[in-house]
Amino acid sequence: MRYLQRTLEDVLARAARAFPAILLTGPRQSGKTTLLLRKFGRTHRYVSVEPPDIRAAATADPRGFLDLYPPPAIYDEVQCVPALLPYIKEMIDARRHVPGQFFLTGSENLLLSRHVTETLAGRAAILRLLPLTAREMTHRSAAPFPWERAKSQPPAPLSRSSLWKMLLRGSYPEPASHSKRDAVLWYGSYLHTYLERDVRSLKQIGDLTQFQIFLRALAIRSAQLLNLSELSRDLGIAVNTVKAWLSVLEATDQILILRPYFENTGKRLVKTPKVYFTDTGMLCHLAGLRAPEHARSGPMGGAIFETAVVSEIYRATLHRGDDPKLFFWRTAAGDEVDLIVDAGGTLIPIEIKATATPNPRMAHGIESFRAAYGNRVAKGYVVHTGGVTLPLAPGVTALPFTSLF
């Protein structure tokens, strides 16, 4: 499997020069270990604390274990032994001025971050690595977003059929970069591993079959308003259970919750959040889609493409070391914009259309948003599946999806 350069590499290098410890979180198989070994494998010892025997040894004698694997070191899946963290803190405090002593990885974002916040506050930089972005897959990892460019650039060449093949295979490094890998088998195995390891460790979920049904029900709601009561009723589970299971998926970076953008504009606004999977390959697998033409032309085509655009911007922003400030906008009267990017106080409205033929009517939501928020709104975009770039309305441009990378 070929290595694809990750945008986060430069951010990691800067953090290693400034902090004694760096915590790298993200879902399993997103490339955390590969990235750290490639960048720091020659200078840092490596140990995974996930195997049961190693976990038991680290738990029984943390100081002895750290003496056996002293810094500079990479501790993989450190959430398996949270008891190590106070002793890592002790070692850091003894040499506080030395940066890059420990790299810690974990597959559980919220749980591990809480332990780090309590134990390594001010000592650890916290970064997140999600599956590959399209710009990483096309070797354009450092490319700025269209709204950051002084002038337009030609999009990366990619046919519509290649686009939907890419969305179906998803963005996890193994199926995305290994074209002969059976993606259906890979996602099936990944799902089993995810359920058995991460889900059981985060929540005491007795019925994993019911949780898997919940996952599939959520998949067909990707890019839709998240109605907790409806989901609860359809599955026959309590609303509090739905909330708890959603927190598991957020904690393990399987989904992102997009919240509505609103200020006091005098309009009644929809305040229900939307849910998106962070990987279109997992979304398609859970939805039972196995062929690109079925993904493209089926009833979920629009949701898959919208998920792809939102998750691409989300992942690419995270991999630059930034905090994604993403929202959507919808009024009770029906005006809406699929995605609002808050770029330092400037609002970038983006409509997402699974069509190769954009038209001026698609700019209506962006024009309504601009009317509501005035000069805070910058140029807007209609992102589509085709290959043309053209103006649709004053301050609104149609862009191919490939222009995002």
Image (cartoon, helix red, strand yellow):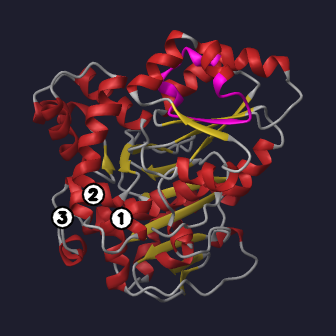
Q: Amino acid at mark 3?
A: Leu
Relative vertical location of residue 367 with respect to residue 358 in this rendering, above or below: above
Residue 313 image offset from top left, x and y in percent: 54, 60
Mark sitting on residue 289: 3
Q: Residue at x 29, y 48 (%)?
A: 190
State which quadrant residue 23 falls in.
top right
- Asked which secondary structure carries label 3, the reply is loop
Mark sitting on residue 160: none
Residue 28 image offset from top left, x and y in percent: 42, 44
Query: Considering depth in this image, is 56 or 333 the residue closer to the camera?
Result: 56
Query: Considering depth in this image, is 38 or 195 the residue closer to the camera?
Result: 38
Q: Which residue is mark 2?
A: 186
In contact (CB < 8 Å): disc 1 and disc 2: yes
Q: Which residue is mark 1?
A: 175
The answer to whether residue 171 is visible is no
Q: Residue at x 51, y 49 (%)?
A: 327
